[in-house]
Image (tube, grey):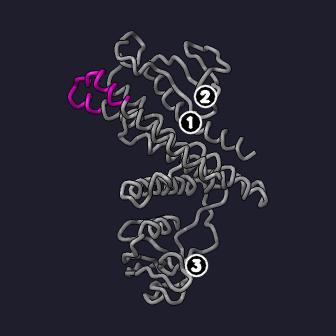
Amino acid sequence: MGILIAILLFSAIVIFHELGHFLLAKANGIRVDEFSLGLGPTLVGKEFKGTKFSIKLLPFGGACMMGEDDADDMSEGSFNSKSVWARISVIVAGPVFNLILAWILCVIMVAWVGYRAPIVGEVSEGYSAKEQGMRSGDVITKIDGKRIHLWNEIALSNLMNSNGEKTEITYLRDGKETSVILEPRALEGDINKRLGITSTAELTKAGVTGSLQYGVYTVKYWIDYTMDCLKMLVGGKMGIKDMSGPVGIVDAVDETYQSSKAAGLKIVVLNLMNFAILLTANLGIMNLLPIPALDGGRLVFLLVEAVRRKRVPPEKEGMVHFAGFALLLVLMVVVMYNDIMKLF
């Protein structure tokens, strides 16, 4: 059951991404040859208003085929016949739709169960927070000068501070803001260094306006989380073995389902929604990176064209995208191998 849910979840996220490309293509009068769910041979297909809608054999991924790689096709309605800004809007639409989906799911979650406000629940003895006078009920407003709105942002900041550097915490008490410098430390039994504060167990309920607002804050948190993971990957704090592909994602979703089902349907749905938010935010951000063959790589060439008012020679762009695709394919094979090895 968990594996089926994972496939459906992943497919829905990819289809929403491709839907962004499709809708903006149609809005700009661009011909869409095929809109498909999955990869490989076609199982079912039907043409409607000039577009073939199909379901493929392999239930991963999807595609919106607009002929963007056919540089010689300048016929009416072709992708390359449109203005550079029209093409940019179509390429950007996929990742943007992923972030919109993440926001919609975040709004639903906040409206349903509330959000974890940055309110201190307990201040532990022996840690810096206690020594600097922090108390239960303090509302943390800033970390190192950066304004925060969710407790998860505090946890993420602590996770990224792997070197145990001092952290400036600004908190609100009785209407007055106070800033203190905390030094993470590990006492006996601690695995990682801590500031010595924990969140309150209660979730803060939000109305309609609050749900929309904190939905944005939650999406921002997941974007920051994705970017920080990328920084750790580039900085060598994470390696390829820490990455997951489709096999790893399916296994993680199945594990989430299996561990949650005993707690009831509500917990299963909430945990899967959290996973979906992470996946769709990741897909949106990763596709905006300037990596050849991805949306971000195509966007770079389009922006260069917009600045110089002249298209980059198609054969050169094609070579770059082909090289990028080949590298991504190798990376996918390595990641998939690691995912399979983790299963045994």
Residue at horizontal 56%, vertical 36%?
14
Q: Which residue is mark 2?
A: 37
Residue at horizontal 56%, vertical 83%?
189
- Which numbered disc covers residue 157? none
Residue found farthest to the left? 308
What's under tag 2, amino acid-wise?
Leu
Q: Is there a contact, CB below 8 Å, between mark 1 and mark 2?
A: yes
Tell me where residue 109 sits by quadrant: bottom right
**Position of 300 compared to 54: left or right?**
left
Q: Which residue is mark 1?
A: 14
- Which numbered disc covers residue 121? 3
Q: Secondary structure at mark 1?
A: helix
What's under tag 3, amino acid-wise?
Gly
Q: Secondary structure at mark 2?
A: strand
Give the vertical position of 232 relative to 154 (above or below). above
Q: Residue 19: within the magenta?
A: no
Which residue occupies the foreground of this view, 157 or 61? Answer: 61
Q: Earlier in the sequence, mark 1 or mark 2?
A: 1
Q: How far apart are the alpha carbons under marks 1 and 3?
A: 39 Å
Q: Residue 319: within the magenta?
A: yes
Q: Which residues are magenta?
A: 302-322
Q: Is residue 210 visible?
A: yes
Frontmost of labels 3 and 2 is: 2
